[in-house]
Image: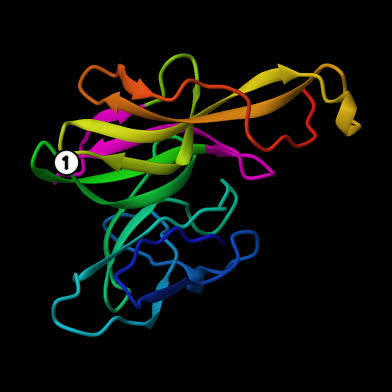
Amino acid sequence: MCLNSPCQTGCQVSAAGDPAAGTAADVDHFVTRSDIRPPTITVTQAAGGASQPPYIFVAPRGYTSTSIGQSGLMIVDRDGGLVWFGQPLGGTPLNFTTQEYRGKPVLTWSAGMVNEVGVTTGTSYIADSSYRVIATVKAGNGAQTGLHDFKLTPQGTALVTAHRKVPVDLSALGGPAKGAVLASAAQEIDVATAHAASGRPLGRSATVKRATA
């Protein structure tokens, strides 16, 4: 399984089991929450020092409806003990971490689809200290939202990556005449209004790879 884990410096974690062939021992079980099946987390190397944050944020993914465990958002303590487990709300979870929004601490993550070559598309989320989603963020100007980067600013905006397909003739590279390249850009989105505050105009990527529409 894949782990997306913004740990404190020097921290290493691993999750038990294979999403496709796990056993009951690979997940944590709770009598009061039999509906959740978070994978067991082992902290293999903990960061030293009392100044280190007490919690580790991970986003295990790769599970399906038939897997023994579940993909999701996890907060664990420095011994791997589960503090909170939540659903990503929109597909494969990425970049689960803490940030500040309007001067208050929040949880943020992105979730959506990841294709076979690593192109991501989806939505980014902001949740308050009670784990309630208070805002969602998507790219503007007709672009798809990439999930690799999601950064909140003190101005109440979010920095995201965006992309869309651009038709291009790839015959000179041995590809189709009616091919496409993925054009990418960075955008700054006003979280409250969902409008794109700024962004480099989308154009052709600097690196052209063979692709089909």
Q: Is residue 109 above or below residue 17?
A: above
Up/down of 129 relative to 176, above or below: below
The secondary structure type at the circle numbered 1 is loop
Coordinates of residue 103 in the picture (x, y in percent):
8, 41
Coordinates of residue 114 in the picture (x, y in percent): 59, 41
- Above/below status of 76 relative to 189: below
Magenta: predominant secondary structure element? strand
Is residue 127 in the magenta section?
yes
User: Residue 76 lies in magenta, yes or no?
Assistant: no
Q: Nearer the viewer, residue 79 or 25?
A: 79
The structure residue drawn at horizontal position 41% and vertical position 60%, both measured from the top left corner, is 38
Quarter assignment of residue 108: top left
Give the quadrant of the C terminus: top right
Residue 52's image quarter?
Answer: bottom left
In the image, residue 119 sits, relative to residue 98, either above or below, namely above
What residue sits right under mark 1 in the picture? 128
The region drawn magenta spans 113-137
Q: Nearer the viewer, residue 94 or 156?
A: 156
The amino acid type found where label 1 is placed reads Asp
Q: Position of residue 170 (x, y in %)?
A: 83, 25
Residue at screen point 39% across, 35% down: 160
